[in-house]
Image (spheres, grey):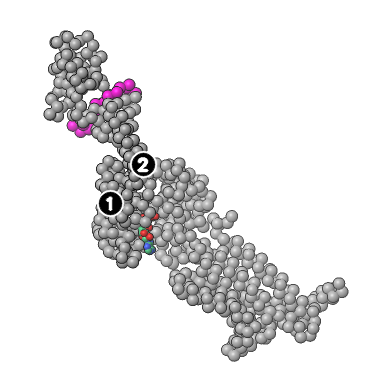
Amino acid sequence: MTSNVSFLEFFIGRLPEVLNQTVRHLSITGTAVFIAIMIGVPLGILITRNRQVAKVILSVANVMQTIPSLAFFGLMIPFLGIGRPLAIFVLFLYALLPIIKNTYTGIQGVDDSLTEAGRGMGMTNAQLLTMVELPLALPVMMAGIRIAAVINIGTATIAALIGAQGLGSFIFRGISMGSNNLILTGAVPAAVLALTVDFILGRVEIWLTPKGMRK
Amino acid sequence: MIEFRKLTKSYDHKVNVVDQLDMVINDGELVVLIGESGCGKTTTMKMINRLIEPTSGEILVNGENVLAMNPIELRRNIGYVIQKVGLMPHMTVADNIELVAYLKKWDKKKRRQRSSELLDMVGLDPALYLDRYPHELSGGQQQRIGVARALAVNPDIILMDEPFSAVDPITREQLQEELIRLQDEVKKTIVFVTHDMDEALKLGDKIAVMKDGKIIQFDTPENILKNPINEFVEYFVGKDRLWKSPEMLFAQDIMHKRPTGVLADRTPAYALELMREKETEFLVVVDAPSDRPRHMLGVITPRELKGKGTVEKNKMRDLMRTNHPTVTERTNMVDVLSLMKTHHVRNIPVLGEEDGYFKGLITYGSIVNIITDAITEIESDEGKEVSHDQ
Ligand SMILES: Nc1ncnc2c1ncn2[C@@H]1O[C@H](COP(=O)(O)OP(=O)(O)OP(=O)(O)O)[C@@H](O)[C@H]1O
Ligand SMILES: [Mg+2]
């Protein structure tokens, strides 16, 4: 009981710093996800045109996903040094798979009869993509982006270890100082942040679902 | 006009799924491609708008080689209706109908006007349906929109791949009726794929029966029914089909072709003798002997002869009844039967449609013959498996 009360006091005392790190946290993950969208979506579209290439790209992205994040950060230090760019780069790689995969499956999932009808009516490939495939795949793509964002918010706590700051810095300081309050000061906002982002992007997903397809 | 010249498609360079097709489809004709699953109907059709590229051969549309045209432009000028309808679920009915017009950069006002017009044409109220989404429509309504979409920019040619096979039988019948009505109005060149023979007979100006990528018989529905070129077509049409489609049976198919006539100047005694000899009570009075074309003047039955048998000066021309109903060779069986019923007659003379000559006679007997023929043919097939394999 007492520890709870003291955590609240502790937390409120550090509110400005918490807000500050939350913003950094968000900016690292936001940037990473943004770049992942910019690269993942076109890549996802591209591989729908060739099954072989799709297989290769998706398995490479899959393998990347299995490398433990800590190891990944370590492996990349020689190339990018420590700090924000490294954190963003690794988080970007993690965000890539769900985005590519969902773009790919979203477009693949568009009913064949629709692409056939579109083609039969004389749509060019570009028109088919922008008028049929993308609008219909958008909710699935958005779900991928949402997954990527939520995973990244969690993983980004580790980025504090390589000097990128963020909410993780409370956690690691807390661990080294043996302060539960400090650990919670990082962990609770990180969790709340993940839930909030998940909720908001969920809303966006519904909003992006074409009107004729909402149940 | 659409013309195939040795049109061939092969996926593996071994089997031709469409094999050296030669075919001419005239303007304003509705041609049905029919055959078992996998015989190449869809492939043939999709080569017309180049959704599938031929392996060899040519397709000419109005004399122009389709393979030399820009496929995108070509497709925008050919209507296309598919079995699964393929309406864009994220677009309203209006946007769906206007899709090709949009691709062709018609302005919005003209597009909207056209989509309202087309909705009317397929029997849906524009005020009610323009802004709906496809999932808010029944299957039958969806396919009506599919048809309207194909007509949007008023193409001369429309391709329809089993357009009505996904809806229930009652809706299918309605859609077929509507297509017939629509086709009367717009007179498009339509290539229609189906594997439902009833549908083919009902809709087709001509029917092409396909097997293994080849056209086995390309003919009018009537000829496909009555003169199937081989066992396969006969099997495919079904022996009982003619009987099931009485509107395809014409007076000339049912009638006795050598009916008994009696010359106008014969006496009653002669007529009575003739009736006895031919075992009939119905004579047609004619103006020439049977080896020459002759006109019907009237009819004689025992009723007209009653009490006149000995009066030699009465000739057939004085006694005959002239108000007896007749039909022409091309009157169909349904009409023949209803005529017999309304006039309470057992015999109907058949006259030439053009020349008006007396051609034959339909009697109860000839109708019974048709029925028994049909029944015995069906029965004789029940035991043996009809072979139609390659
Ligand atoms: N992409 C393809 N690759 C290889 N073979 C194909 C391909 N598409 C079609 N075929 C083959 O071509 C043949 C003709 O197919 P098609 O779709 O024209 O048949 P269909 O007459 O329309 O049949 P259904 O009534 O089932 O629609 C079939 O044997 C089919 O297996
Ligand atoms: Mg087919």
Q: Distance between the residues labelled 2 and 1?
A: 25 Å
Q: Which residue is drawn at 48% across and 64% down?
A: A133
User: Mark 2 falls within which chain?
Assistant: B
Identify the residue under disc 2.
B382
Q: Is residue A87 above or below residue B193?
A: below
Identify the residue under disc 1.
B216
Q: Is residue B63 above or below residue B200?
A: below
Q: In which quarter of the image is residue A30?
A: bottom right
Decide if residue B4 is on the left or right side of residue A90.
left
- Front: mark 2 or 1: 2
Q: Depth check: give the residue in front, B65 or B355.
A: B355
Q: Which residue is drawn at 24% across and 17% down?
A: B301
Q: Can residue B384 be seen in this view?
A: yes
Q: Dividing the image into 4 quarters, which one contains the C terminus of chain B?
A: bottom left
Q: What residue type is labelled 2?
A: Glu
Do discs 2 and 1 share a chain?
yes
For residue B61, the mark is: none
Q: Where is residue B61 in the image (x, y as percent from the top left)?
A: 28, 57
SS at badge 1: strand
Q: What stretch is highlighted in magenta?
A: B342-355
Q: Is residue A13 above or below residue B8?
A: below
Q: Which residue is drawn at 21% across and 31% down?
A: B257
B354 drawn magenta: yes
